[in-house]
Amino acid sequence: MDVKKIQIADFNYELPEEKIAKYPLPKRDESKLLIYKNEEIAEDRYFNLAHHLPDNTFLIFNNTKVVEARLLFKKNTGSMIEIFCLEPDEMYADITTAMATKTKVLWKCLVGGAKKWKEELLIKEIDLKHQTPLVFEKANGSLITLTAKKIKKTNEYFLIEFNWNNEHLSFAEILHYAGIIPLPPYLQRDAEVKDKETYQTIYAKYDGSVAAPTAGLHFTGSLFASLAIKNILPHYVTLHVGAGTFKPVKTETIEHHEMHAEFIDVSIEFIQQLIETIQQQRKIVCVGTTSLRTIETLYWMGVKLSHWSMVNGQWPKKIDDISIHQWDVYQMQSEISAIDALRILSGWMKENKVHRLITKTQIIITSHYQLKIADGIVTNFHQPQSTLLLLISSFVGEQWKKIYNYALENDFRFLSYGDGCLLWKH
C-alpha cells in the first residue's frame, strides 16, 4: 500500500472530555502505566517501570526545555495582542544560538488579534523586582522594556523583531520573565504558576520547545534511582518540539498533511554509544515520540550518506544534503543495517569535525514504517487522528485500537498530563 494513501479516519476514536487530564497527579511517578507485550496488556504504575525493562536497557530521553513562548502585549486602547513564538529566523544556526542572543532577535510567530495590530510597535514592561536578588543583580536593574515589531507576514507565520534594553539578558531569559507557558490547547484552561514546574521534565536542559516531551513528565529522581539498580541509565538527545505537534490532520489521507520540521541536536558520543548498544544486543527504548523520531532520523541520515557516496564518489560537506524530509524514508531503498548506517554517520561527523549533529527532521512515522533502531517506547495516550497515533501504530499495528479501548475502559487519563504506556515492538 502507498503510505501516502493512509486514511486518517482509520486512526480515530472517541475521546470523552472527562478522560483528558487537565492537571497532573501530585506525584509524577504514581501515574498509571499500561504495558503491552506479546499481544498481552498489563497495568502498573510508573514507579515500577524498572520491573518491566530488561537489565542494561538503553533508555533514551529528550532533554529539551519548554520556553514561556506566549507573550501578551496590551495596546493603549486596552486590547490584547498575543504573540506565540514558534522558532527563530533562518539567520540563526540553531535554536540554542538564537535563544542566547541579547538585545535583539528575529522570531517566527503566530499572532492572536493580528487585525488589531497596525504598524505601531508593541511595548511591554518587564518588572524584575519580584525575582531573586541574583536575577536583579544580573539584569542590573528591575525594569526592562520589550518591544515587538512586524517585519513580514507569510501564510504560516509573522516574522517579528524583538528588542529589549538590557544587554545582560538573553532572549531565553526575557521569555522566562515575561512569557507564559504554552499549554496544549486541548487542556482548555489558562496556564497557572505551577505549570512552569509541572509542564517540564526534571531533566530539561536546553531551551527551545513550545511543548513538553510529555512522556518524560512522569520521571522522578526515585524512579531514575530504581532504574539505575538494573544498570538502566538515561541517555539524552535533543529535539525542540514545535507547535506542529498539536496540528491536527485535516486531510482525508496523510499525503496532503505537512509534517512539522523540528530541530534536533545529537552528540557524536551518543551515536557511538548507540552503536555499542546494538552490537551488545541490548534493548533500546525511547521515552517519547520525539526521542524515537530523533534516533530513527539518525539511521536515515546514514543511509543518505551511503547513497550520496555511491552516486558522487564522496560524501557531501553540507548537513542540509542529508537532512530528512517528510517522505524520504519511504522513497529510499535500504538494506543497510542500523550499525552500518550509524557508523557511516559517525564517520562523516569525524571527517568534517562535527561534534554535534544539529539539523532539522521532518520524518513522519506511520503504520507502514519499519522501525530501524527502537525496540520499545514509553509514551502518553495521544489525540485521535494525530500523527502521534500513526507513529504508535508502527510499534503495535492495528492493536493500537485494543490498547486504547482498554485504557478508556480502565480509567486511564489521556494526553499531556495523563497516564502512559510501555509498548514493545510487535
Image (spheres, rainbow, N blue to C red):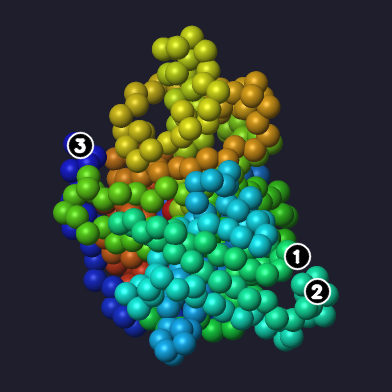
Residues at marks 1 and 2 touching, judged by CB atoms closer than 8 Å: yes
The residue located at (55%, 65%) in the rendering is 162
Choose top left, top right, bottom left or bottom right for residue 77.
Answer: bottom left
- Helix, strand or loop status at disc 3: loop
What amino acid type is highlighted by mark number 1? Answer: His
Q: Which dot marks residue 168?
A: 1
Disc 3 to disc 2, C-alpha distance = 60 Å
- Say left or right for 287 vs 145: left
Query: Percent position (x, y) of residue 406?
Result: 33, 67
Query: Closest to the observer: 272 or 179?
Result: 179
Q: Which dot marks residue 140?
A: 2
Is residue 196 visible to the viewer in this orientation of the structure? no
What amino acid type is highlighted by mark number 2? Answer: Asn
Query: Closest to the observer: 305 or 416?
Result: 305
What amino acid type is highlighted by mark number 3? Answer: Asp
- Helix, strand or loop status at disc 1: loop
Q: In the picture, which quadrant includes the N terminus?
A: top left
Q: Pointer 3: residues within 10 angstroms few (<14), some, or many (20+)?
A: few
Q: Residue furthest bottom?
A: 78
